[in-house]
Image (spheres, rainbow, N blue to C red):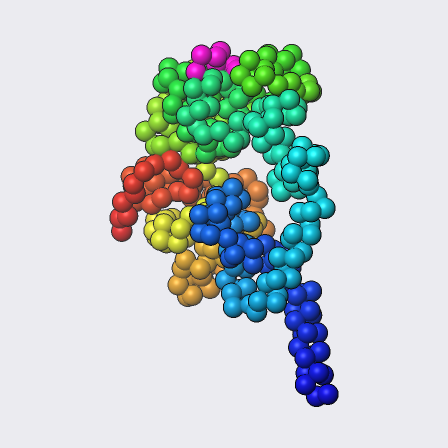
Amino acid sequence: MAEKQTEENKNEEELSFYEKLTSTQKCAILMMLLGEDEASEILRNLGPKEVQQLGKEMYNVQGLDQDTVNKVLDEFLAIIKTQTDLGMGSSNYIKNVMTKALGENKAQSVLGRITPTESDKPIEILDWMDARSVAELIADEHPQIMSLIISYLEPGVAADVLVLLPEDVQSDIIHRIATLETVQPDALAELERVMQLKFKTNTSLRASSVGGIKAAASIMNFTKQNMEQRVIKALGEKDRHLAKEIQESMFTFETLILMDDRSMQTLLRNVDQEILIIALKGTEDELKEKIFNCMSQRAAANIKDEMEVLGPVRLTEVQEAQKAVINVARTMSDEGTIVLAGRGGDDFVWCS
């Protein structure tokens, strides 16, 4: 009787543990059952956040008893049996899986590559192409078409595409992107024509907001320094005011939070303390904490006291102080003394 009660208690504990498993933990268990090649192939197709979450749970689910593992497998097989017959209705199944996994927009992009007639947003297919493929795709197009397509890309990819295009069009493209705001249907119609020729798909037309100063600045942030200087110089010859606006938007005070601690410490040693105190007024707490953590406790305490004594400061004064700090950072970055996060480059040399 006692043995039967013990067995029942054990089963209840196992069931209770299984019921507490999250979907991510169940996926992690399945991943641990796959071979290394299969598991790595799945991870390769996930985003950074998903990989981190799944990887963490793969560590946590090690050493589970076989009964719990079997229950997870049974649940997985039951779901598969109800969702697809490997042929009948598989198109809808694939579409639903893609949408749930990637969201509607990205799912349409993927489906556009594997089943072109199913996608109604071919421009998003570019997100899944490497820089060289995109550059080859648009190399023979008008600079305006190039600019529209590049403005849709992530800044890092856009910068890689830009460097692969002829030098004589690079500054023109940045100029066009910087002056883009709302793209009207007639412009999108031309873009659709190009994309139809490339991908044989259709897209719905509507006015879209792309480009602008910030978009151009974001792309330039990811270019290498020699290319940045060359493009900005050429752009300045064409539109000096626009070139200045792009430069001012490239590295804002807020982007300092992305710097590594060593670079931040080096920068702080070269910034006037009075300017820093004003620049920190009205700054987000996260950035303040980042800066204070790169100082000695005594220095941080002194600056906090000075900020409190200083009281309210005009917004224009704060902005000027922040610009002064950024100017120092840009100069030091150009000299190779520090590394500004996002700036393109291959090798960095640390200097004290």
Q: Is residue 39 left or right of residue 2?
A: left
* Rendered residue at 48%/12% (across/down): 141
Q: Is residue 343 left or right of residue 213?
A: left
Q: Is residue 25 left or right of residue 339?
A: right
- Residue 170, above or below 77: above
Could you say where residue 274 lies in the image, as x and y percent from the top left? Answer: 43, 51
Q: Which residues are magenta?
A: 139-145
* Rendered residue at 50%/53% (across/down): 34
Residue 235 visible: no
In this view of the protein, which residue sits in the foreground, 167 or 352?
A: 167
* Rendered residue at 65%/62% (across/down): 71
- Residue 22, above or below 117: below
Could you say where residue 191 lies in the image, as x and y percent from the top left? Answer: 58, 15
Could you say where residue 138 lies in the image, as x and y percent from the top left? Answer: 47, 17
Quadrant location of the N terminus?
bottom right
Could you say where residue 68 lies in the image, as x and y percent from the top left? Answer: 62, 66
In this view of the protein, which residue sits in the foreground, 255 or 90?
A: 90
- Residue 73, above or below 250: below
Residue 229 sits inside the magenta stretch: no
* Rendered residue at 35%/23% (across/down): 230
Residue 295 visible: yes
Residue extending farthest bottom: 2
